[in-house]
Image (cartoon, rainbow, N blue to C red):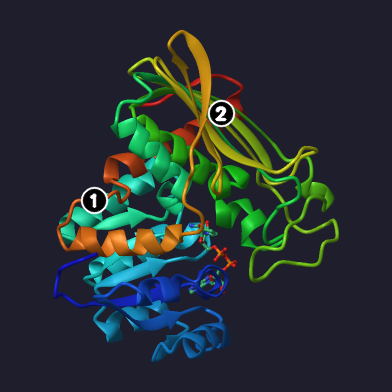
Amino acid sequence: MTTSSKQYRVGMIGAGAIVQRGHIPNFQAVPNAEVVAVCDVNLARAQEAAQATGVPNAYSDYKEMLSKEGLDIVVVAVPNIYHKPMTIDALRAGANVLCEKPLALSSADALEMYGVADEVGKQLAVGTHYRYSNPVQSAKQQVDAGFFGDIYAARTLWNRRAGIPGYGSWFTNNDLAGGGSLFDIGIHAMDRALYLMGYPEPVSVSGASYAKFGPRGLGLGGWGMDKQKPTPGARFDVDDFAWGFIRFANGATLMLEVSWAAHFEDQFYTELYGTEGGAYIGSEDRMELYTNLNGQPVNIPVAVPKGGNSYGRFALDFVRYLDGEQTDIVTREQALISVKIVEGIQKSAASGKESRIA
Ligand SMILES: NC(=O)c1ccc[n+]([C@@H]2O[C@H](COP(=O)([O-])OP(=O)(O)OC[C@H]3O[C@@H](n4cnc5c(N)ncnc54)[C@H](O)[C@@H]3O)[C@@H](O)[C@H]2O)c1
């Protein structure tokens, strides 16, 4: 719980996230934050979201919102291509920014965004909120207590059998999204593992990516405000399946597997391998620890709390972070590592060779 008396005026750009993921209620639940405006290029959508949540102002032009509202926090939740320009404009308008993932389409863009944040003295963080989920927090408790010893390897995956979002919309258009499953859910799966591994410095990446379902109009999911009917022929030039193998300077390795569509069951979990113990960390409330006890292998199921709201915790932590408190919010170093890794996977997938990370 924050103890600050500072009140934060929050504005949201992109009503899709608000309607589908409850961003407004999550910020409204933060004691010293007030959501004062919503913007969407589709004004009716912004008005509807504002009305449904009791937010007083709706805009179709985010620059107008920035100039009129005196915002302390701007949430950028729009197609990926707009993350950089809107974040920079919001920072320059005097706001701190919580940008949705992926922070940027390239590491050069991400560095530029943090450069502007430094120049204007504002904070910037990215929306990888699954680190706040109950199983990941339970695992973090074991990491901090030293249960695993030295974590030398991890495997993290988020595989959907049929979950391509926004078919034919920005989601499946490389010019607007910059990537497919890797950028959409791969970054979340990766953050879960890297957060628990202590975000080691990556040195090289080997990756492969495919688009075997989307171009045929198969494997479509329900997500996205502007998707087309599920018929083949809509634009689809992003990945719907990607694997990455990442080596770190401390000798550790990470295997990342992600799919929007595949002939396999839905899967969402992270495995940790340490010198003293290992773990299976599920998506909801399942977690199991593995170790040796008195010379015998034992499996320890962990009673992970049920429920919870990872984005809500994330919103609260962002505000606490602005209040100067110690939090688990995504740091600049972590955000840059994430962008460099997915960029490396894309480069390696395109070249067929391992990609070095500078
Ligand atoms: N953190 C998470 O769990 C999570 C989950 C889903 C999506 N996302 C991210 O959130 C972002 C948006 O995804 P989504 O699922 O909400 O997409 P969506 O397509 O459902 O909604 C996007 C919204 O942005 C609006 N928009 C487009 N251009 C705009 C502009 N110039 N100005 C104002 N509004 C504009 C659209 O009208 C639409 O309402 C993406 O970057 C995505 O990666 C994050």
Q: Can you give x and y, in whole percent of width and height, for residue 22 in the image?
A: 50, 71
Left or right relative to 283: residue 273 = left
Nearer-the-camera pick, 136 or 185: 136
At 22% from the left and 58% from the top, the residue drawn is 321
Q: Which quarter of the image is occupied by the N terminus?
A: bottom left
Percent of width and height locating residue 245 = 53, 24
**Element assignment for label 2:** strand
Residue 310 percent location from the top left of the image: 44, 57
Dot 2 crowding, Cα within 10 Å, few <14, some 14–19, many 20+: many
Amino acid type of the residue that numbered disc 1 sits on in the rendered structure? Gly
Mark number displayed over residue 14:
none
Crowd around label 1: few <14 · some 14–19 · many ≥20 (10 Å): few
Q: Residue at x 60, y 29 (%)?
A: 349
In the image, is residue 133 above or below residue 38? above
Circle nearer the N terminus (1, 2): 1
Q: Which residue is mark 1?
A: 115
Task: Using the image, determine if residue 72 lies above or below residue 84.
Answer: below
Residue at the spot x=38%, y=23% of the render?
148
The residue to which callout 2 is attached is: 244
Quadrant housing residue 249: top left
Q: Nearer the viewer, residue 241 or 5?
A: 5
